Image (cartoon, helix red, strand yellow):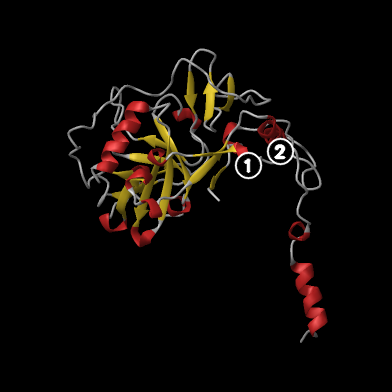
Amino acid sequence: MLKPLLALSALTAAVPAIAQTAPAAPTAADAAASDWQPIPDNELLVMTLRGGHQVFIRLAPRYAPAHVANIRKLAEARWWDGTSVYRVQDNYVAQWGGGDDKTTLPPTVIENPPAEYEWSRYDGVTNFARADPYAVKTGHSADGWPLATDGKTSWLTHCYGMVGVARDLAPSTGSGAELYTVIGHAPRHLDRNIAIVGRVVEGIQWLSALPRGGGSLGVYENPAERVPILSARLASQLPEDERPHFQVRATDNERFAAWLSERENRKPPFFTMPAGGADICNAQAPIRRAP
């Protein structure tokens, strides 16, 4: 049996060296208080799953206005209540909504809005150092959305946690009644083929850690495996004292530029070989709960 001092010494030695490192001093890449911008209540969808687990989704009305309008109408109609997460495909997506649970849409919802897969103007305010295999250039909008462009058109990118609209074969564009989020390696081949309408900002673990479906494309073959959705509401629909509040870090300033440079050029003591660049999906703008 180890003596107390020897036991303490052994325990300390077992702790990884990185855990004993003193907190880093503030750097030029740290955000200023003014860099944190609020996400409006009507741009936040709160989905509550079985067990009370909640998934918070920031919506992107500037980039997919028609689909987001549909999503707001569906939330207001409480359409998702009683539907489920019915597909979880490993290293790909978790999908929820209609499926076999519900098929009739509210009358004000457009079944196939315009294909909001890309647009003509690139409004990125940051640029990555290295080329992207799927685009000429990638960066962020001023309010933190991950963007890509081929020099003529621009689009949101399929990064981890991004939320898209499930659809059938073209010309179907999907109504927004069935949604998915990326839970694996970024499937950038989906860019410009499906409308992206948002990003999970908290609670992704309640989708990414679900058992994988055994059916085709990860669909749960047994209905009992599906994860019930208790409710899905816009934060603006909730009572004031129950509304969650989130902030996104603005990217149009020198502090974010320094933050991005740090991620493209990781430094010692841990890193011995900086990459000299980064993928857009490995440097998404931070989002946090409002203090």
Q: Where does the image place residue 221, in percent across and percent down from the top left?
A: 29, 51
| Residue 290 relative to residue 81: left or right | right
Q: Quadrant of the N terminus?
A: bottom right
Question: Which type of secondary structure does the marked residue at label 1 adopt?
Answer: helix
190 w.r.t. 282: above or below:
above
Residue at image x 65%, y 26%? 128
Residue at image mark 2: 29
Q: Residue furthest top?
A: 152
Question: Three-letter amino acid code at disc 2?
Answer: Ala
Q: Where does the image place residue 88, in percent across and percent down from the top left?
A: 39, 48
Q: CA distance from mark 1 to mark 2?
A: 13 Å
Q: Which of the 4 image quadrants contains residue 104?
A: top left
Q: Where does the image place residue 102, in percent across and percent down from the top left?
A: 21, 44
Number of the front mark, 1 or 2? 1
Residue at image mark 1: 33
Residue toward you, 42 or 277? 42
Question: How many numbered markers are drawn?
Answer: 2
The answer to whether residue 212 is visible is no
Q: Where does the image place residue 170, in percent across and percent down from the top left?
A: 30, 23
Residue toward you, 253 or 78? 253
Question: Three-letter amino acid code at disc 1?
Answer: Ala
7 w.r.t. 132: above or below:
below
Residue at image x 40%, y 33%? 197
Mark 1 touches mark 2? (CB < 8 Å) = no
| Residue 291 relative to residue 60: left or right | right
Residue at image x 34%, y 59%? 50
168 w.r.t. 236: above or below:
above
Residue at image x 44%, y 50%? 244
| Residue 146 relative to residue 268: left or right | left
The answer to whether residue 178 is visible is yes
